[in-house]
């Protein structure tokens, strides 16, 4: 569906299946029919290669509730053997002021940014995002456009569902309408 350095936007009305499609792409939901291929082979979401390659933010982000925001991101980076600069990612997503807070104490917008940061502190060749513009203000949406364009430029395949036509037009190479 998406090649290295390409972004595919999944668009459609609420309830059309955008989130379900993305969940199928990452192996989080069982297909009723059809196939998902990864690297030319049938998707095996339990394979180490797949898990190492794909970063996703679907629905609300999962987080470790008993560690601070910065500790959460450091732990994810360590688990993925990433050399990401966690402090830089915190600053980029606007979470530096709350770095020492526990995730449950964050606002919904801050938790969404933590979910995005969780994708950006780990290595990835594929990035799958379900409505990444949610809970972002105008400046946050502008940052997101820039960040997704940088992901494409770095050779990451980006697949995202969105209702934000400006984001779709700025980032997507192709659209899939459901």
Image (cartoon, helix red, strand yellow):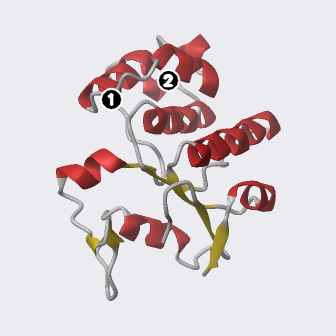
The residue closer to the viewer here, 101 or 46, is 46
Q: At numbered mark 1, what does the secondary structure look like: helix, strand or loop?
A: helix
Horizontally, is 140 left or right of 57 in the view? Answer: right
* Quarter of the image where the C terminus is located: bottom right
Q: Is residue 53 visible?
A: yes
Horizontally, is 9 left or right of 170 in the view? Answer: left
Indicate which disc residue 173 carries.
none
Total marks in image: 2
Horizontally, is 116 left or right of 45 in the view? Answer: right
Q: Is residue 11 visible?
A: no
Q: Are marks 1 and 2 in contact (CB under 8 Å)?
A: no
Residue drawn at (54%, 55%) of the image? 158
Q: At numbered mark 2, what does the secondary structure look like: helix, strand or loop?
A: helix
Determine which quarter of the picture holds residue 13: bottom right
Determine which quarter of the picture holds residue 11: bottom right
**The furthest residue to the bottom:** 33
Task: Please give the residue where the numbered disc 2 appears in the rendered image.
Answer: 105
Residue drawn at (36%, 24%) of the image? 72
The residue closer to the viewer here, 106 or 158, is 158
Residue 70 image position (x, y, % from top left): 43, 17
Residue drawn at (61%, 18%) of the image? 91
The residue closer to the viewer here, 37 or 45, is 37
Image depth: mark 1 or mark 2 in front: 1
Task: Please give the residue where the numbered disc 1 appears in the rendered image.
Answer: 76
Residue 24 image position (x, y, % from top left): 37, 70
- Tell me if residue 84 comes above or below residue 8 in the rendering: above
**The furthest residue to the left:** 47
């Amino acid at each position: 569906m998406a090649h290295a350095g390409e972004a595919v936007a999944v668009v459609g009305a609420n309830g059309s299946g955008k989130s379900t499609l993305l969940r199928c792409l990452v192996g989080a939901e069982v297909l009723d029919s059809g196939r998902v291929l990864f690297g030319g082979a049938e998707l095996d979401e339990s394979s180490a290669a797949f898990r190492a390659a794909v970063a996703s933010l679907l629905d609300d982000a999962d987080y470790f509730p008993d560690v601070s925001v910065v500790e959460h991101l450091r732990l994810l980076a360590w688990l993925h053997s990433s050399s990401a600069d966690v402090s830089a990612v915190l600053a980029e997503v606007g979470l530096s002021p709350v770095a020492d807070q526990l995730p449950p104490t964050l606002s919904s917008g801050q938790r969404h940014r933590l979910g995005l940061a969780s994708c950006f502190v780990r290595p990835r060749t594929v990035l799958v995002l379900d409505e990444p513009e949610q809970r972002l203000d105008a400046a946050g949406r502008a940052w997101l456009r820039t960040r997704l364009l940088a992901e494409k430029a770095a050779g990451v395949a980006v697949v995202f569902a969105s209702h934000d036509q400006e984001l779709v037009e700025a980032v997507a190479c192709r659209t899939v309408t459901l």
